[in-house]
């Protein structure tokens, strides 16, 4: 599956943004979808994930309560609604897809996601 992310930009602290990721291919609903982020000099961070049906989600502690991941399998789209943004949320955000089964979303890691979008930059000013 090929992924195309969009929606990044510059926003003030406390503001919100919605990232979108559109996938090509007929098997979109067979993938777990996630968002990672990476800021300079840091490792790529696992931010959020959503199950194939959309019934289960995972959030990193750093974003829980502020970010919401959702998906629309009919439109091959996964969204990340980001509210109450903080300067430390500044990063390049990547959507990704993986086909791992039998593992909790919280236990997935970078290597479990095999398809990646190109990244979209989110900058939060203080």
Image (cartoon, helix red, strand yellow):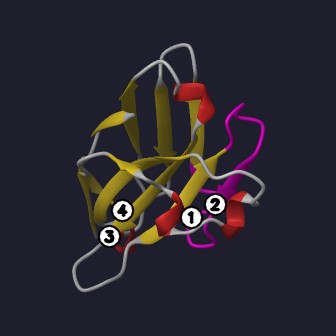
Query: Pointer 3: what residue?
Result: 38
Q: Are marks 2 and 3 in contact (CB under 8 Å)?
A: no
Residue in the foreground of this view, choosing between 9 and 38: 38
| Chain part drawn in magenta | 51-67
Q: Earlier in the sequence, mark 1 or mark 3?
A: 3
Instruction: Give the numbered dot on residue 59.
Output: 2
Nearer to us: label 3 or label 4: 3
Q: Are marks 1 and 2 in contact (CB under 8 Å)?
A: yes
Q: Are marks 1 and 4 in contact (CB under 8 Å)?
A: no
SS label for mark 1: loop
| Image position of 8 with respect to 123: above or below | above
| Disc 3/disc 4 C-alpha distance (Å) | 18 Å
Q: Earlier in the sequence, mark 2 or mark 3?
A: 3
Q: Earlier in the sequence, mark 3 or mark 4?
A: 4
95 left or right of 7 in image? right
Residue, far bottom:
41
How many residues crowd around disc 1 within 10 Å: few (fewer than 14), some, or many (20 or more)? some
Identify the main secondary structure in magenta: loop
Q: Are marks 1 and 3 in contact (CB under 8 Å)?
A: no
| Image position of 87 with respect to 71: above or below | below
| Disc 1/disc 2 C-alpha distance (Å) | 6 Å
Query: Pointer 1: what residue?
Result: 63
| Disc 2/disc 4 C-alpha distance (Å) | 20 Å
Residue at image position (46%, 53%) is 35
Residue 25 magenta-highlighted: no
Quadrant hosting residue 20 = top left
Nearer to us: label 2 or label 4: 2
Instruction: Give the numbered dot on residue 13.
Output: 4
| Disc 2/disc 3 C-alpha distance (Å) | 16 Å
How many residues crowd around disc 2 within 10 Å: few (fewer than 14), some, or many (20 or more)? many
Nearer to us: label 1 or label 2: 2
Nearer to us: label 1 or label 3: 3
């Amino acid at each position: 599956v090929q992924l195309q992310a969009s929606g990044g930009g510059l926003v003030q602290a406390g503001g919100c943004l919605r990232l979108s990721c559109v996938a090509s291919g007929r098997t979109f609903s067979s993938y777990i979808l996630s968002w990672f982020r990476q800021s300079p000099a840091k490792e790529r961070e696992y931010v959020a994930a959503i199950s194939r049906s959309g019934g289960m989600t995972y959030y990193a502690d750093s974003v829980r309560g502020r970010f919401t991941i959702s998906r629309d399998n009919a439109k091959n789209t996964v969204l990340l609604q980001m509210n109450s943004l903080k300067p430390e949320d500044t990063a390049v955000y990547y959507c990704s897809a993986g086909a791992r089964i039998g593992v909790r979303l919280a236990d997935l890691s970078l290597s479990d996601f095999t398809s990646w979008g190109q990244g979209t930059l989110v900058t939060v000013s203080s």
